[in-house]
Image (spheres, helix red, strand yellow):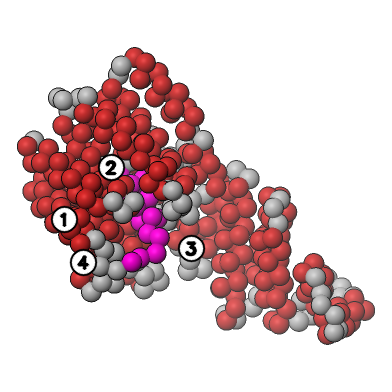
């Protein structure tokens, strides 16, 4: 601690005790001064004020400076003091976000590692997954789940299963996703979750089984999904639910990870399976590939290369869903053309029933999201029949 300006401290105290309403900037100036003599009381206030200012800023460089100062102030809070860990993690979270927004990935990862050391490992797991380090990310997911740090929610369990699958641990991935599905079945039976969510989960687990080479389990899970879809087509949802499109977007995007380039530290990819809390640089880079893919699709269409075109169109559809698939306004109208085209292209490939089954399944799950259940059932029934023939 340097030499204390006691006059400045007195003026700051008078300012804070005055009857006038202080601006956030004035509060920060006062907290900076008084924190030098009363760190226990004023360092937490300084952290809060700096973070509030950063949240209001629209300048990445300013965000970074404010978050960096908040981190330093949080580190100065006495070790063991109740507000230290919570303030430090919030400050580090703002700091890493600002670093990633500016493309300073290595520094951002270091901030996430410090957060993990303080007990908040979720963000580090996302970063590791972005870089293809799925086993390490899954270990963090498991540690958080088994210690009770994270809830056994859809978002946490899907992320954990996705990282296990990315690491090639297919049986473990299916087991984790199966835990989620068991809970969803119980909730659906008690009308505590949507049958649509149960359907999406069942279809996703069938894909996981298929990819792992467990054909019998995949077929049984598809049959269960078809039964739930038949109930939806016959009676609809037993209850009205608020917007649940994020569930569909997450699982649809995850189903396409295998068709994307492998993730690495040099070429990070989105952490498929999460609730879209991706690094801003990674998200922007992924969505910015849309024009390139659309140009590629145009060339493939002109050349009549239907199998490759169908695969590229699916990648385009996933990006469109990630960009705005959670917006309910005119949802069906905006997205139906993507899935209709996928099915139409696949029907032109009579010797490739697997692609047609995939396209029909994709459209069926979209139609469930659009709450158009009878056509969804018809599509999925056809897809199941095609897969059973194989």
Where residue 161 sits in the image (x, y, percent)?
Answer: 29, 55
Write the residue at 54% across / 61% down.
114
Q: CA distance from mark 4 to mark 2?
A: 23 Å
Q: Which residue is mark 3?
A: 116
Residue at mark 2: 363
Q: Is residue 385 left or right of residue 46?
A: left
Quarter containing the C terminus:
top left
Q: Nearer the viewer, mark 2 or mark 3?
A: 2
Q: Marks 4 and 1: which is nearer the front?
A: 1
The numbered dot on residue 375 is: none
Among the two numbered marks 4 and 1 on one chain, the one whose residue lies closer to the N terminus: 4
Residue shown at 44% from the left, 27% from the top = 294
Label 4 to label 1, Cα distance in Å? 16 Å
Element class at badge 3 = helix
User: Mark 1 = which residue?
Assistant: 230
Looking at the image, do the residues carrying marks 3 and 4 touch, with CB atoms under 8 Å apart?
A: no
Reading the image, the residue beneath label 4 is 185
Q: Position of residue 340 (x, y in %)?
A: 30, 35
Placement of 174 over or under 310, stated as above or below: below
Q: Quadrant of residue 212?
A: top left
Q: Which is nearer the N-term, disc 3 or disc 4?
A: 3
Q: Indicate yes or no whether the magenta region holds residue 250.
A: yes
């Amino acid at each position: 601690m340097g030499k204390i300006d006691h006059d400045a401290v007195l003026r700051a105290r008078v300012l804070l005790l005055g009857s006038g309403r202080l601006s956030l900037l004035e509060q920060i100036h006062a907290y900076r001064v008084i924190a030098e003599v009363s760190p226990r009381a004023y360092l937490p206030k300084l952290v809060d004020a700096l973070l509030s200012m950063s949240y209001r800023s629209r300048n990445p460089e300013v965000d970074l400076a404010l978050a960096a100062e908040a981190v330093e102030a949080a580190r100065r809070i006495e070790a063991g003091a109740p507000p230290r860990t919570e303030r430090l993690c919030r400050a580090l979270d703002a700091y890493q976000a600002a670093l990633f927004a500016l493309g300073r990935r290595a520094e951002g990862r270091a901030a996430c590692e410090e957060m993990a050391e303080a007990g908040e490992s979720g963000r580090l797991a996302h970063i590791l997954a972005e870089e293809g380090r799925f086993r390490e990310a899954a270990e963090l997911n498991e540690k958080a789940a088994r210690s009770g740090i994270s809830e056994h929610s859809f978002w946490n369990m899907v992320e954990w299963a996705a990282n296990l699958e990315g690491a090639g641990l297919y049986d473990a991935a299916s087991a984790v996703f199966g835990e989620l599905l068991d809970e969803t079945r119980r909730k659906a039976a008690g009308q505590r979750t949507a049958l649509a969510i149960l359907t999406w989960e069942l279809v996703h687990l069938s894909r996981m089984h298929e990819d792992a080479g467990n054909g019998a389990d995949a077929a049984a899970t598809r049959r269960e999904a078809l039964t739930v879809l038949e109930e939806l087509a016959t009676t609809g949802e037993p209850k009205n639910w608020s917007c649940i499109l994020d569930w569909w977007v997450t699982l649809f995007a995850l189903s396409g990870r295998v068709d994307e380039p492998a993730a690495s530290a040099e070429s990070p990819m989105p952490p498929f399976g999460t609730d879209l809390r991706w690094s801003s640089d990674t998200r922007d880079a992924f969505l910015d590939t849309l024009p390139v893919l659309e140009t590629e699709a145009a060339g493939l269409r002109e050349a009549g290369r239907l199998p490759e075109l169908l695969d590229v169109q699916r990648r385009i559809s996933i990006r469109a869903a990630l960009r705005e698939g959670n917006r309910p306004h005119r949802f069906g109208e905006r997205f139906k053309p993507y899935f209709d085209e996928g099915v139409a292209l696949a029907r032109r490939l009579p010797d490739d029933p697997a692609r047609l089954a995939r396209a029909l399944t994709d459209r069926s799950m979209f139609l469930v999201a659009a709450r158009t259940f009878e056509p969804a059932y018809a599509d999925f029934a056809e897809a199941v029949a095609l897969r059973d023939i194989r």
